[in-house]
Amino acid sequence: MAWQGRVVAVTGAARGIGRALAGAAASRGARVVVLDRDAGGAAEAAAALGGTAMTLDVADGEAVAAAIAVIEAEVGPIALYCSNAGILERDPDPALAASADPGSWMRSFSVNVMGHVHAARTLVPLWRARGGGAFLGTVSAAGLLGQIGSAPYGATKQAALAFLDHLAIAHAEDGIRVAALCPQGVDTAMLRDAGAAARDGVLSAEAVAEAAFAGLEAGRFLILPHPEVAEYARRRAVDHDRWIAGMARLRRSLL
């Protein structure tokens, strides 16, 4: 897939994986739009990349639709939308799985799930009308394996993966390519809350971004920068009871 001159929009792009995805797109000659709630961070990243900055809270569906409309009108048709913004809120009481309050659950769903849904609701009709586009959702290995210490994160990331699955299946014949980026430990501000994710090695955000573009260019749906995640997911699928017992032991070692 050639990116030269094409428009790539990235959410949560002021820092971390989003910033690296925007950088990888810019290095391939794309016209990058940096979207983030942090207006100053977005402006700084866009200036460094020669791109365009926009302030956006992906939990606001109307704001997402409006941002996409502005990009399409003022920058150009979006070829790739990297739906990357996400949040991790830990269980307040590590000993109680249901300790997160409703507000934490709602915030997690509004960003980690609805951020993808809001974007797809606007983009899919545009892409169907012009014969194609690409949607990359940053999910996390938690979407396949769960997350020790954060019920809202694990549940919403699995829901996000289910939505991307559905999106890929429903629009396979519309020229719309969908990919789910599922890294494990990544050297970002979120890593300090990742718990077990750091045990198998930490990748740089730039390495994850390169893996993402390699996966997109190869036409893969599931992009695993940490290849061992595929084996973990296989074990979980083959013997879920054994998987739960093993994860319970891992959890005890982290408390």
Image (cartoon, rainbow, N blue to C red):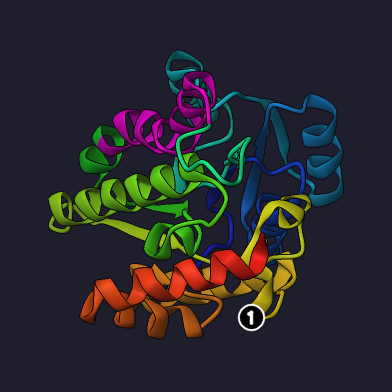
Is 106 magenta? The answer is yes
Q: Specify the quadrant that holds the N terminus.
A: bottom left
**16, 232: nearer the viewer:** 232
User: Could you tell whether 20 is left or right of 75 in the image?
Assistant: right
Q: Which residues are magenta?
A: 100-124
Vertical position of residue 41 compared to residue 19: above or below: above
Residue 41, given in percent of the width and then of the height, sits at: 83, 35
Magenta stretch, main secondary structure, is: helix
- Mark 1 is on which residue type? Asp
Residue 19, given in percent of the width and then of the height, sits at: 72, 51
Residue at image x 55%, y 49%? 8
**232, 161: nearer the viewer:** 232
Residue 78, given in percent of the width and then of the height, sits at: 46, 42
Residue 248, given in percent of the width and then of the height, sits at: 46, 66
Q: Quadrant of residue 26?
A: bottom right
User: Could you tell whether 238 is left or right of 90 in the image?
Assistant: left
Report the residue marked by disc 1.
Answer: 200
Vertical position of residue 5 compared to residue 125: above or below: below
**247, 227: nearer the viewer:** 247
Residue at image x 39%, y 45%? 155
Mark 1 neighbour class, 10 Å CA radius: few under 14, some 14 to 19, many 20 or more? few
Residue 132 can be seen in this image: no
Q: Quadrant of residue 172?
A: bottom left
